[in-house]
Amino acid sequence: MHAKLNGRDWIAPLTIRVVSNQQNRQVGASAGEVSPQLRVELQRLSLRDAVIRIAEDQMHSAIATQSDGFGVYNIDAKFNWCGAFAYWCWQQACAIKSVPNPFGSNGGVLWSPHKGNQLRDA
């Protein structure tokens, strides 16, 4: 779709993706679970850009629009979901691209400041 002004594009073209699963997302819950089309796209991106693209996919999913995120991204609901979400995006991107996660295998490093400090002091 294009919005035109004086015959020129007024805004960047809008990309519409049709996703046909119950949660309306291309990256699923298990490690490396991704639609074939998005897998190809992610392979072409840097790791950082792949993480951002995965986060964008989740932001437009039913999880983002119909829940608060607590208890969704492989973490107990008592912890802040935002850190778990960040770690989950990195973990998914690394699994899809077959590279090690720079944050390691312990998701607690990003779960919450409190949890991160507990792990550091352990």
Image (tube, rainbow, N blue to C red):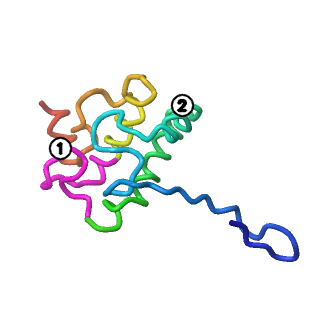
Kind of residue indicated by mark 1:
Lys
Q: Nearer the viewer, mark 1 or mark 2?
A: 2
Residue at the spot x=21%, y=58% of the render? Answer: 70
Residue sitting nearer the eye, 80 or 18: 18
Q: Is residue 18 above or below residue 41?
A: below
Instruction: Looking at this view, name the residue that lies furthest to the top.
Output: 99
Q: Residues within 10 Å of mark 2 (few under 14, many from 20)?
A: some
Residue at the spot x=32%, y=41% of the render? Answer: 87
Q: Quadrant of residue 20?
A: bottom left
**Relative to 27, is 81 on the left or the right?**
left
Residue 80 forms part of the magenta stretch: yes
**Relative to 64, is 121 on the left or the right?**
left
Mark pair 1, 2: CA separation: 32 Å
Residue at the spot x=35%, y=37% of the render? Answer: 33
Kind of residue indicated by mark 2:
Gln
Quadrant that contains the N terminus: bottom right
Residue sitting nearer the eye, 54 or 83: 54
Q: Quadrant of residue 2?
A: bottom right
The image's mark for residue 115 is: 1
Residue sitting nearer the eye, 94 or 30: 30
In the structure shown, which secondary structural element does the residue marked by tag 2 occupy? Answer: helix
| Region rendered in magenta | 68-85
What x and y, as percent, mark residue 74?
21, 44
Instruction: Looking at this view, name the residue that lies furthest to the right.
Output: 6
Residue at the disc numbered 2: 43
Magenta stretch, overall SS: loop
